[in-house]
Image (spheres, rainbow, N blue to C red):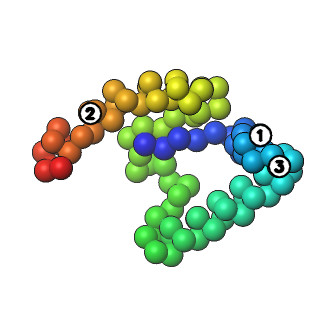
Amino acid sequence: MWLRAALAVRAARVAARDGLSPEEALRELRAREECERRRYREFYQIDLADLGRYHVIIDTAAWSAQEIVDALLPLTRRFQPERLGRPS
């Protein structure tokens, strides 16, 4: 599962949560994302921009945290190891 939102939406959320200006939050997000992209590519050979590996992608921009949880709970039950033929 991949949860995404536009960079501006995420920056506004981070700014509100951490008491930053929107510009500071945007700079921090960009720096963190670049660091994560490099690390995942280097250590795991994973391209974080490739969303093809995910079964479910949700744009969280217009959803509350509770709405996202409510949408994902039934889906997580479908992907439990026992249902996929794997031991837990």
Q: Picture quarter containing residue 31? A: bottom right
Dot 2 surroundings within 10 Å: few (below 14), some, or many (20 or more)? few
Residue position marked by numbered label 2 in the rendering: 78
Q: Amino acid at mark 2?
A: Arg
Residue position marked by numbered label 1 in the rendering: 16
Residue in view at x 82 percent, y 49 percent? 20
**Cβ atoms under marks 3 and 1 closer than 8 Å:** no
Please tell me whether mark 2 or mark 1 is closer to you in this view. Answer: 1
- Of pointers 2 and 1, the one earlier in the residue sequence: 1
Of 29 and 37, which appears nearest the observer?
29
Give the percent coordinates (x, y) of residue 37: 58, 65
Q: Please say whether residue 3 is visible from this viewpoint.
A: yes
Residue in view at x 71 percent, y 55 percent? 29
Q: Amino acid at mark 3?
A: Leu
Dot 1 surroundings within 10 Å: few (below 14), some, or many (20 or more)? few
Examine the rendered structure and indicate whether residue 13 appears above or below residue 86.
above
Of 60 and 67, which appears nearest the observer?
67
- The CA span between labels 3 and 2 is 39 Å
Q: Secondary structure at mark 1?
A: helix
Q: Please say whether residue 8 is visible from this viewpoint.
A: no
